[in-house]
Image (tube, rainbow, N blue to C red):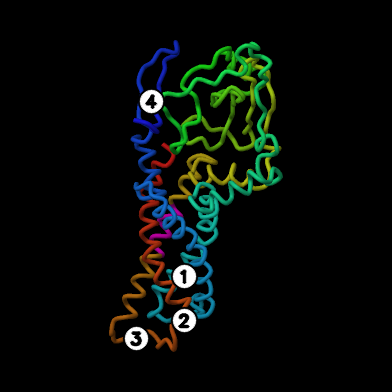
Amino acid sequence: MAGNQRYVFLDHNNQFVADQNAKHTYSNVMRSIHSSLFTENTIINYLVELTACWTIFMILSGTYLLIKKHLISNKSKALRWQKWHAMIGVIIAIPVFVLVLTGLPWSGFMGSKIAGMMDTNGDLGQGELAINPPKSDLNELPWATRKNKQPASSEKGSSGHHGNAAMPQTKLDYQISIDKVVVQAQKAGIKKPFSIVYPSDKNGTFIVSNTSNSGVTGLDVSPYKEQTLYFDQYSGKKLGTIKYDDYGIIAKWFTWGIPLHEGHLFGILNKIINLFVCIALLVAIGMGFVSWIKRTKNTAVKVPHRVKKTSIYITHNMFNCIRTINAIIWIITYPSIYN
């Protein structure tokens, strides 16, 4: 089926063992639920993104209500649920804020805006070399074939990330072998594990990289060790290198933020902290809901009458419902996000 990405497994002799539709793996199914509720619909993705971003407003409005009502110092038993709700919220405010900011790079709306800003400004992104990558030297091709149109990929079996098929399925004439690319990459100092991207046309290059956020178990390296190398597809000559030190501030944020968000930046401790924050968020939401229920009931001990429900107060409670749904989805999908 056109547009499907597949994982192909080879043994140590480069013999085919098995293949798998990437979309149907457990971790990728969970990623799809995490980002768009398994619909792969842009509108749903935007709504999930909006809910996540609105958490920032919830933190700010909750802090405002906490200060205004003096909840921490208030000894009233009638307000104990609100007090616990507020205290937990204060404790996890910064971690939740960080989770939201580190999740934005691959979101639908903000992610595209951030990527566009990086693409137009090398000082913020991965540098000028990433914006204008080097090209293979066509002089390495025989003169008679330099003007030839590259072989077209057959639609059947074509693949690409997010539906954009970029790599040709047919090896170009006079292109060096993948084995030579590996040798040249290792000579250039890159260490395993690394990924290799084939040229997309006869002007393209082999791209060999170490990355901290590949999404493939066992392939990631420390952000400091990230590097991308470009090799001429005809001669094997190294054309350029981009390392972590060459990144701009936004690219460095991406490089650290994505593995931090996914929970594999500093091992199992990262996973435990992320999971704790998510559970604490659910508990805080639950306590806020109980507090609201108790306030609406006619009990013997009533909460002091609220003079006026401000727009901040109303909006804060309205989005609690949306945030609860998002938090539950997050905690269900989190254990598999990086499996």
Residues 65 and 149: in front is 149
| Disc 3 + disc 1, Cβ < 8 Å | no
Q: Which residues are magenta?
A: 276-284
Circle 4 or circle 1, nearest the eye? 4
The residue labelled by disc 2 is 310
As for residue 23 lying within the magenta part, the answer is no
Residue at 28% x, 85% y: name it: 298
Name the N-terminal-most of marks 3 and 1: 1
Q: Residue at x 35, y 34 (%)?
A: 25
Cα–Cα span, label 4 and label 1:
54 Å
Disc with the residue nearer the chain's start (2 vs 4): 4
Q: Quadrant of the C terminus?
A: top left
* Predominant SS of the magenta segment: helix
- Residue under circle 3? 302
Q: Amino acid at mark 2?
A: Thr
Inter-mark Cα distance, 3 to 4: 67 Å
Real-space Cα separation, disc 2 to disc 4, in angstroms: 57 Å
Q: Please name the residue that numbered disc 1 is placed on.
A: 86
Residue type marked 3:
Lys
**Vertical side of 152 occupied by 257: above or below:** below
- Can you give x and y, in whole percent of width and height, for residue 119 in the image? 63, 43
Label 4 secondary element: loop
Residue kind at label 1, given as amino acid type:
Ala
Which of pointers 2 and 3 lies earlier in the amino acid sequence?
3
Q: Earlier in the sequence, mark 3 or mark 4?
A: 4
Question: Residue 225 sits in which quadrant?
Answer: top right
Q: Amino acid at mark 4?
A: Gly
- Near mark 1 (Cα within 10 A), the count class, few <14, some 14-19 or many ≥20, is many
Q: Earlier in the sequence, mark 2 or mark 1?
A: 1
Q: Which residue lies under the disc numbered 4?
A: 157
